[in-house]
Image (tube, helix red, strand yellow):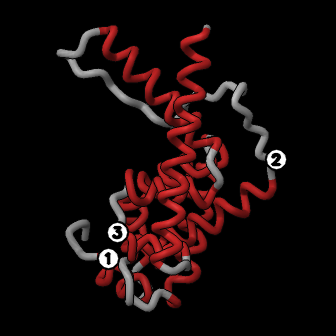
Amino acid sequence: MNSLDDHTLIRLVLEGNTSAFDVIVRRYNTKVYSLAYRLLNSVEDAEDVAQDTFSQAFKGLGSFRGTSKFYTWLFRITYNLAISQRRKRKPALSLNSQTDSQGEITLPSDDASPMKNMEDEEGKTLMDKALGLLSLDHRAGLVLKEIEGFSYEEIALSLGVPVGTVRSRLHRARLELRAILEKLDKERADL
């Protein structure tokens, strides 16, 4: 069943085969969690959103029209839940706040030097912190384009905005991210 495409699995689920939905969950769980984490910058919130995403997807599977990729539809659920989760808590990040990169496990390669591994981890932590300071709209666009590899059209469909809006948001997000990274890097150098 793992080799079946998404549309076949969805058809099976709608026919009552719930084990087909287990395949869908296994197929997309990491992506949904990773996306939720990058949007919320919180392990606990990301776990909640990922679980709720699959719960809502299961309940609403009959409304999936199949005119887009299944992951695009699943992303939209994740994004909407992340916005709701974000509204429930106060976004208490500042340029002086400390964040960690829980939930993102990277194993150093055997041939990499300890200094290189430390630099890579510092860069990743700095990027996570900078992404956390962006607005949710800017962060979502960057994550979808740069990390998930979505096209502008797929991002527009996922976010429910025109392609031109996606392009302008990404442009502004990149400028904002660059400014934040420069400021964080300067603060780190001053320490």
One can see residue 124 in this view: yes
One can see residue 73 in this view: no
Relative horizontal placement of residue 40, taking residue 105 as reference (left or right): right
- What crowding class fits label 1: few (fewer than 14 Cα within 10 Å), some (14-19), or many (20 or more)? some
Residue 138 vertical placement versus 8 (above, below): above
The CA span between labels 3 and 2 is 31 Å
Q: Earlier in the sequence, mark 1 or mark 2?
A: 1
Residue 90 badge: 2
Residue 151 badge: 3
| Residue at the spot 54% in from the left edge and 56% down from the top edge | 172
Residue 165 is situated, as x and y percent measured from the top left of the image, at 53, 73
Which mark's residue is nearer the viewer, 3 or 1? 3
| Residue at the spot 53% in from the left edge and 58% down from the top edge | 140
Q: Nearer the viewer, residue 187 or 2?
A: 187
Residue 161 vertical placement versus 114 (above, below): below
Residue of label 1: 6
Relative horizontal placement of residue 67, taking residue 37 as reference (left or right): left
What secondary structure is marked by label 1?
helix
Residue 151 is situated, as x and y percent measured from the top left of the image, at 34, 69
The CA span between labels 3 and 1 is 20 Å
| Residue at the spot 32% in from the left edge and 76% down from the top edge | 6
Q: Quadrant of the N terminus?
A: bottom left
Residue 177 badge: none
Q: Quadrant of the C terminus?
A: top right
Q: Earlier in the sequence, mark 3 or mark 2?
A: 2
Give the residue at the far left of this rendering: 111
Relative horizontal placement of residue 186, taking residue 148 as reference (left or right): right
Residue 4 vertical placement versus 16 (above, below): above
Q: Nearer the viewer, residue 9 or 117?
A: 117
| Residue at the spot 46% in from the left edge and 21% down from the top edge | 122
